[in-house]
């Protein structure tokens, strides 16, 4: 028993099965990310005035990542085109580029995540705040026992709101320096993980889910580039279809980033 | 359009149906695991889904019985099952008494199990998987292995849900709607299990939906044009689109709530949320309303996922047993498309009480009234089809006929709930419980029973026992109404849902000018409902025995015992792997019963030309 139209287009619908399948899957993905973008809009619109962060993310890194994904979209397309004209060597080269670009994207993303996890906001008992990147904790540092000190590279502010808009002139003018804080003075110390506020929560959730898509897509493309490419010898047409279908997924993942970048980094 | 038909590549001829152990291209007898557990055959997967779903339906029914006992006899130990509960669930059921926490867990899980593990898998996945490829003349689903993965994800989701009863703290207790912040603040990991289970179930339905749509678009046999599709296929097609597009936002919401529960984010937790008298650690700034929007964006279309496949079954059974074409086929098709589309823009009528604003309420009130139009057209077509038919009464037809007034009651009692002014009073009372149960229990479930009795001969080659089928129908019909009809009265009198004591404390608390006691007659109904529910349970015993007994001992019948026109009845019984030994060619519409110009009482949709594009002989042995 064989299923018809796995490779050839059905004449009256003009499409083969897997291509229809991936488009349907992508429609559902649109709704998934659509739900999350709607959540973003509602959370941001409902936030307290002055409490939605701006400029917390590095636009330069975001721009580089955007370019990386845009380039990978081009190499994906070229890899498929190479299959279409039956040039296997070029396919190998182009999709090797795709995989490397994806890994570079993930590398930069991990660096950005790490940067948030070592970024702390400390609320002091006197009502002021110290905010910055962790330099070091003294050996005996313990929040519960209230011993030792922690050193942050950043700034001290009196109003938490000053930490929210880093694009404001005052924030840009502020000089960053090392602050040594004694554990005994600390009321609450928290890093910029998802739990920090609604912005970091939605930032980590959406970019995290996007990164999972990147990882999944990279694994599939790597499989088709490596062990899966044996099909080229037996059934090049079907293999080309696989490259097309995985490419469609990859373009969708790129497109999601094209929305994430302005929403998270630029506004 | 013969020329058009010729363009199709030939069907691959599968092996002959009988006499060989050959199974498609595998030249060996498949073992138990490949045949029944890791099968990619749509018929096996359909039966897997069906049996699992029936088990979950029974399990969900027992949860309901336990709750009804607690409502009628609060704080009294459960008879018979009490010791078992105390043993398996520990302190939550100490002494065999259902604690309020356990009652909440049962309530939440009854809804979840009935909807996501019972009715949807049975109506959509089981019947859809088994029947749709047969009806459209396809050899299988387009993606058989993805189909298998879909069932496995569903099964795993069911296991996660089931296991959550036995963890410390018990299963999820925030209702099947899992409203935040309640769902985040109840101290049990059951909610995390619920969310993980839901993600698995959503994955399963996503894989299924992609498969159904692709199959219906790509694998229709030559000549099976869109307007020749049996309406059941149309209903499944629209259902698949609803599942495909409405479920993902709930998945997004599930991920966000899981983050709230596991990582301490505040997506749905407002600023300054206090739990047990203490302001929590959470950062705040979240929106409880956001959860409700995301949940009901799935939740309402889900209602149509429950009802459309059931309507599809009813249409097939009615057309077959009235022995005449279904009335208004085109109206049915356009109506189901309209329902599918409109179902996406009515969700907030579940949220009139949230204070989301009058303007929004007005919009959703309007769309809710509009969606009732195509729904009524569908029901009207079914009723009018009966007119002038020489109706054959048998068990499937009895259930299909029972569906009509039951769904009618369920649908019409929904109208006051769609209007904000009336809903403010009726919201969260037993009235709404009665309303949606009339849609789903005597409505959808009756249609599903009709489907089981109707397609059982296709799956096994034997009919289920007719006498016990009728006993099953009449007892179910009477007890269903005895269970749910009194709830309308209770709700109108002001009895609120989700009270673990059945309203005793509520009734005792008198606040002058605000709350009046519930009259004794209303409280007394709780006992009546309990015994009606027990009767309903007993009425299912003939069905369960009949189902298993008939597999071996039912009356043997041929391939087409109901003298049906559609393609599913024109394959060998049970259909072999690949379904059609000879390629079908569809030559007419689906409901040509007693049509002028044909001999006999029905004209089959398909012809099976002997020679087929040079592939006249079976391929090989």
Image (tube, coloured by chain):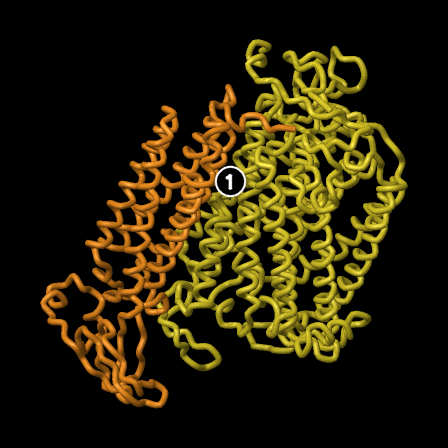
- Is residue B536 visible to us here? yes
Task: Name the foreground residue: A196 vs A248.
Answer: A248
Task: Name the foreground residue: B116 vs B468.
Answer: B116
Q: Quadrant of the C terminus of chain A?
A: bottom left
**Residue B57 % position (x, y):** 71, 54
B561 is higher (above) or lower (below) than B484:
above
Q: Is residue B177 left or right of residue A49?
A: right
**Residue B69 % position (x, y):** 74, 68
Q: Which residue is mark 1?
A: B370
Q: Is residue B61 left or right of residue A223?
A: right
A105 is higher (above) or lower (below) than B341:
below
**Residue B615 % position (x, y):** 66, 15
On what subunit does the disc labeled 1 rest?
B
Q: The chain shown in yellow is which?
A: B
**Residue B242 % position (x, y):** 53, 42
Q: Residue at x 30, y 56 (%)?
A: A109
Give the class, few, some or many, for how many residues have Cα within 10 Å of label 1's Cα (few <14, many ≥20). some
Q: Quadrant of the N terminus of chain A?
A: top right
Q: Which image quadrant is residue B566 in? A: top right
Q: Residue at x 82, y 70 (%)?
A: B80
Disc tally is: 1
Q: The chain shown in orange is which?
A: A
Q: Is residue A249 left or right of residue A261?
A: right
Q: Residue at x 67, y 26 (%)?
A: B327
Task: Name the foreground residue: A30 vs B531.
Answer: A30
Task: Name the foreground residue: B168 vs B514.
Answer: B168
């Amino acid at each position: 028993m064989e299923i018809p139209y796995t490779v050839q287009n059905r004449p009256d619908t003009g499409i083969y099965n897997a291509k229809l399948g991936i488009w349907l899957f992508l429609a559902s993905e649109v709704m998934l990310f659509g739900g999350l973008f709607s959540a973003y809009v509602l959370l941001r619109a409902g936030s307290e005035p002055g409490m939605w962060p701006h400029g917390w993310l590095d636009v330069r890194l975001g721009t580089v990542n955007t370019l990386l994904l845009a380039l990978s979209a081009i190499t994906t397309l070229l890899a498929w085109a190479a299959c279409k004209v039956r040039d296997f060597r070029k396919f190998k080269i182009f999709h090797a580029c795709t995989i490397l670009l994806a890994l570079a994207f993930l590398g930069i993303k991990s660096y950005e995540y790490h940067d948030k996890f070592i970024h702390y906001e400390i609320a002091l008992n006197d009502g002021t705040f110290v905010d910055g990147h962790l330099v070091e904790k003294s050996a005996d540092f313990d929040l519960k026992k209230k011993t030792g000190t922690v050193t942050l590279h950043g700034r001290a502010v009196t109003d938490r709101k000053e930490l929210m808009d880093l694009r404001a002139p005052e924030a840009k003018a502020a000089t960053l320096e090392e602050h040594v804080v004694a554990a005994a003075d600390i009321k609450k110390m928290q890093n910029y993980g998802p739990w920090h506020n609604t912005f970091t929560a939605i930032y980590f959730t959406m970019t995290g889910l996007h990164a999972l898509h990147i990882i999944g897509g990279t694994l599939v493309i790597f499989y088709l580039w490596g062990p899966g490419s044996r099909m080229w010898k037996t059934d090049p047409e079907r293999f080309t279809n696989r490259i097309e279908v995985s490419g469609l997924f990859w373009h969708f993942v790129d497109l999601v980033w094209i929305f994430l970048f302005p929403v998270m980094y630029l506004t | 359009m013969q020329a058009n038909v010729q363009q199709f590549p030939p069907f691959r001829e599968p092996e002959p149906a009988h006499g060989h152990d050959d199974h498609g291209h595998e030249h060996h007898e498949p073992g138990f695991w490949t045949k029944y557990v890791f099968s990619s055959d749509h018929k096996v997967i359909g039966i897997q889904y069906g049996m699992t779903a029936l088990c979950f339906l029974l399990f969900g029914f027992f949860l309901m019985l336990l709750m009804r006992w607690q409502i009628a006899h609060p704080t009294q130990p459960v008879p018979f099952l009490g010791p078992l509960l105390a043993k398996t669930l520990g302190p939550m059921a100490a002494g065999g008494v259902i604690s309020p926490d356990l009652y909440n867990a049962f309530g939440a899980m009854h809804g979840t199990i009935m909807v996501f593990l019972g009715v949807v898998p049975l109506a959509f996945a089981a019947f859809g998987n088994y029947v749709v490829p047969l009806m459209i003349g396809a050899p299988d689903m387009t993606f058989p292995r993805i189909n298998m993965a879909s069932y496995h994800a569903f099964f795993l989701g069911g296991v996660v849900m089931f296991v959550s009863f036995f963890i410390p703290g018990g299963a999820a207790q925030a209702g099947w709607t899992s409203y935040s912040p309640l769902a985040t603040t109840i101290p049990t990991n059951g909610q995390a299990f619920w969310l993980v289970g839901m993600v698995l179930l959503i994955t399963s339905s996503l894989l299924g939906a992609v498969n159904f749509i692709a199959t219906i678009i790509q694998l229709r046999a030559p000549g099976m044009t869109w307007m020749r599709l049996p309406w059941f296929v149309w209903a499944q097609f629209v259902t698949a689109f609803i599942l495909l597009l409405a479920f993902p936002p709930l998945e997004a919401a599930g991920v966000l709530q899981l983050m709230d529960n596991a990582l301490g984010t505040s997506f749905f937790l407002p600023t300054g949320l206090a739990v047990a008298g203490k302001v929590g650690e959470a950062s705040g700034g979240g929106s409880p309303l956001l959860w409700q929007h995301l949940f009901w964006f799935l939740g309402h279309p889900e209602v149509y996922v429950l009802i459309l496949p059931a309507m599809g079954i009813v249409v097939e059974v009615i057309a077959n047993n009235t022995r005449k074409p279904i009335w208004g086929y085109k109206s049915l098709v356009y109506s189901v498309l309209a329902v599918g589309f409109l179902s996406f823009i009515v969700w907030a009528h579940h949220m009139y009480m949230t204070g989301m604003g009058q303007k929004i309420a007005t919009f959703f009130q309007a769309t809710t009234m509009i969606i009732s139009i195509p729904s009524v057209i569908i029901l009207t077509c079914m009723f009018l089809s009966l007119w002038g038919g020489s109706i054959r009464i048998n068990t499937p037809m009895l259930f299909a006929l029972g569906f009509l007034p039951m769904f009618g009651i369920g649908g019409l009692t929904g109208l006051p709930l769609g209007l904000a002014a009336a809903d403010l009073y009726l919201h969260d009372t037993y009235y709404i419980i009665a309303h949606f149960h009339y849609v789903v229990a005597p409505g959808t479930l009756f249609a599903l029973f009709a489907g089981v009795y109707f397609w059982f001969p296709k799956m096994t080659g034997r009919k289920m026992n007719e006498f016990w089928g009728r006993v099953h129908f009449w007892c179910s019909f009477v007890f269903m109404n005895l269970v749910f009809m009194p709830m309308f009265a209770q709700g109108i009198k002001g009895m609120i849902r989700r009270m673990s004591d059945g309203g005793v404390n509520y009734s005792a608390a008198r606040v002058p000018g605000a709350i009046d006691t519930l009259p004794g007659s209303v409280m007394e109904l709780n006992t009546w409902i309990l015994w009606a529910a027990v009767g309903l349970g007993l009425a299912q015993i003939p069905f369960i025995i009949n189902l298993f007994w008939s597999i071996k001992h039912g009356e043997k019948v041929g391939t087409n015992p109901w003298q049906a026109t559609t393609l599913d009845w024109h394959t060998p019984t049970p259909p072999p792997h690949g379904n059609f030994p000879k390629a079908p060619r569809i030559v007419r519409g689906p409901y040509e019963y007693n049509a002028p110009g044909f001999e006999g009482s029905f004209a089959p949709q398909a012809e099976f030309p002997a020679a087929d594009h040079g592939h006249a002989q079976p391929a090989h042995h």
